[in-house]
Image (cartoon, rainbow, N blue to C red):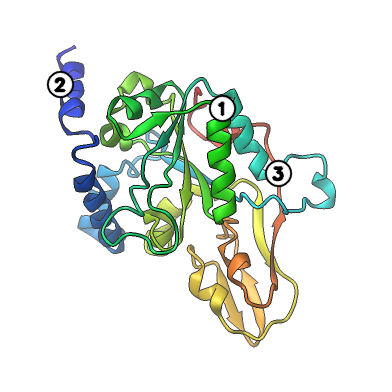
């Protein structure tokens, strides 16, 4: 009981709120800078322990990239399966509680994002997400409001990631018993998102925690070899040589390469059937939303 009271006291005092938001946005930028040390023996091990990546049998931090492009076309074998956009819609409709963050902590940190609105934040779903409203960093949202927010994210061309980060128990101030009753639906830009910017820098043990929901980039045409796709790929999955594009299994299907390709060579294609709901993708536990 004393341990629980102490944890609650720490969260009440130090978890992010409307008054200390600027401090935490700065900390997120610090994490961004420290990511390059993720594979070093001492500091890397410490970072993984703090962020709870050190014990895959016990800690289940993970995320799934959900391409919001409604023009995606399923392969012949998957024609009757919903698109990634629809699985987010279903999550929102079926959730017991929803809140919309007042700002994006990545785009609002350091230098304000010049490409995407910094006041366009994540959607949180599940009972554990109520704490974000209580702490003044989000507003409660109806199903229709959350769906409208999702639509805007798609229109902006942002990358959607459904993420459960265990270390954020202390960041947001979530009570331990509610930790598995929340999920973040993030709208990420490649220029500011701490995760997208650092996939290349962290090792495979962390990279493997973040996956596609069944869609990958594919290039079947010969191009001029400008290398734009290789340059912007968040996970370093693309190589261009003599006009031929090679895409490895590391691809997370975010669609950034496809949207930025000046020759429209790359498509996002379905390589695995979609599951019924987003919770089924998670390993180690089933989010109670």
Q: Is residue 163 left or right of residue 69?
A: left
Disc 3 or 2, which lies upstream in sequence?
2
Q: Is residue 279 visible?
A: no
Mark 3 and mark 2: Cα distance apart in space: 44 Å
Vertical order, 18 against 73 (above or below): above
Q: Is residue 234 left or right of residue 29?
A: right
Q: Position of residue 62 (x, y in %)?
A: 45, 42
Task: Give the number of the disc on residue 143.
Answer: 1
Q: Crowding near pointer 1: few (<14 within 10 Å), some, many (20+)?
A: some
Disc 3 or 1, which lies upstream in sequence?
3
- Considering the numbered disc 2 on the image, is that residue within a helix, a strand or a loop? helix
Q: Crowding near pointer 2: few (<14 within 10 Å), some, many (20+)?
A: few
Task: Give the number of the disc on residue 6.
Answer: 2
The residue carrying mark 3 is: 83
Q: Quadrant of residue 113?
A: bottom left
Mark 1 and mark 2: Cα distance apart in space: 35 Å
Mark 3 and mark 1: Cα distance apart in space: 19 Å
Residue at point 83%, 47% (across, down): 77
Q: Are marks 3 and 1 in contact (CB under 8 Å)?
A: no
Q: Nearer the viewer, residue 59 or 30?
A: 30
Vertical order, 63 against 201 (above or below): above
Residue at point 64%, 88% (across, down): 242
Vertical order, 141 against 230 (above or below): above
Q: Quadrant of residue 83?
A: top right
Disc 1 or 2, which lies upstream in sequence?
2
Q: Is residue 213 left or right of residue 269?
A: left
Residue at point 48%, 51% (across, down): 208
- Considering the numbered disc 1 on the image, is that residue within a helix, a strand or a loop? helix
Q: Are marks 1 and 2 in contact (CB under 8 Å)?
A: no
For marks 1 and 2, give the one nearer the viewer.
Answer: 1
Give the quarter of the figure containing the N terminus: top left
Q: Position of residue 19 (x, y in %)?
A: 19, 37
């Amino acid at each position: 009981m004393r341990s629980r009271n102490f944890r609650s006291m720490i969260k009440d005092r130090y978890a992010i709120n409307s008054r200390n938001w600027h401090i935490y946005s700065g900390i997120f930028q610090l994490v961004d800078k420290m990511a390059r040390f993720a594979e070093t023996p001492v500091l890397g091990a410490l970072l993984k322990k703090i962020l709870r990546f050190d014990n895959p049998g016990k800690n289940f931090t993970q995320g799934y990239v959900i391409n919001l492009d409604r023009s995606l076309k399923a392969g012949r074998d998957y024609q009757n399966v919903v698109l990634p956009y629809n699985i987010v819609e279903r999550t929102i409709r079926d959730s017991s509680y929803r809140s919309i963050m007042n700002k994006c902590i990545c785009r609002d940190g350091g230098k304000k994002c010049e490409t995407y609105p910094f006041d366009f934040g994540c959607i949180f779903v599940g009972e554990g997400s109520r704490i974000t409203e209580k702490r003044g960093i989000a507003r409660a949202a109806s199903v229709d409001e959350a769906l409208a927010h999702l639509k805007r994210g798609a229109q902006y061309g942002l990358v959607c990631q459904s993420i459960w980060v265990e270390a954020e128990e202390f960041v947001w101030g979530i009570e331990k018993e509610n930790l598995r009753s929340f999920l973040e639906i993030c709208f990420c830009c490649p220029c500011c998102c701490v995760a997208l910017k650092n996939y290349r820098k962290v090792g495979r043990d962390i990279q493997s925690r973040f996956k596609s929901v069944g869609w990958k980039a594919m290039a079947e045409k010969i191009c001029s070899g400008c290398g734009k796709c290789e340059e912007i790929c968040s996970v370093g999955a693309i190589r261009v040589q003599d006009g031929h594009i090679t895409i490895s299994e590391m691809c997370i299907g975010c669609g950034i390469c496809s949207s930025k390709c000046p020759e429209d060579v790359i498509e996002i294609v379905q390589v695995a059937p979609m599951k019924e709901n987003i919770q089924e993708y998670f390993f180690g536990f089933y989010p109670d939303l």
